[in-house]
Amino acid sequence: MGQLTQFAPFLLMFVVIYFFMIRPQQKRAKNEKEFESTLKVGDKIITKSGLHGKVTELADTTVIIETMAGKLKMERSAISMEMSAALAKKQ
């Protein structure tokens, strides 16, 4: 019984860390992957670096976006899920 009470605080800390840090991060990563896979040609997006553009071509891991400066090839992971969703709600 004594050993169990010694490890209870550590076990409790692990559970708290899991539910407040690890699990939300995994959920966010899953949502971002889902967002990347649902991109389609014509979607208006914002990149994580703040570039606004429209998707013109899609490949497995890359995307070509058209901006006011021309066309840019980027990784799909460079597109901001939150900002692009906010842009879609505005329109």
Image (cartoon, rainbow, N blue to C red):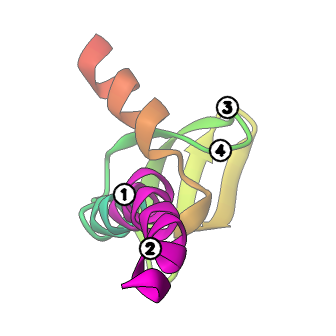
40 relative to 19 in the view: left or right: left
86 relative to 48 in the view: left or right: left
The C terminus - image quarter: top left
**Please, what is the three-letter code of the amino acid marked with disc 4?**
Lys
Which is the main secondary structure of the residues drawn in magenta?
helix
Residue at the spot 37% in from the left edge and 63% down from the top edge: 23
Distance from label 4 to label 1 (Cα)?
27 Å
Q: Which disc number belongs to residue 5?
A: 2
- Looking at marks 4 and 3 on the same chain, the residue that comes earlier in the sequence is marked by 4
Question: Can you identify the residue that label 4 sits on?
Answer: 48
Question: Can you identify the residue that label 1 sits on?
Answer: 19
Using the image, determine if residue 6 lies above or below residue 34: below
Residue 49 among those drawn in magenta: no
Give, as a single range, the part of the protein colored magenta.
1-27
Which SS class for mark 4? loop
Question: Can you identify the residue that label 3 sits on?
Answer: 68
**Please, what is the three-letter code of the amino acid marked with disc 1?**
Phe
Distance from label 1 to label 2 (Cα)?
22 Å
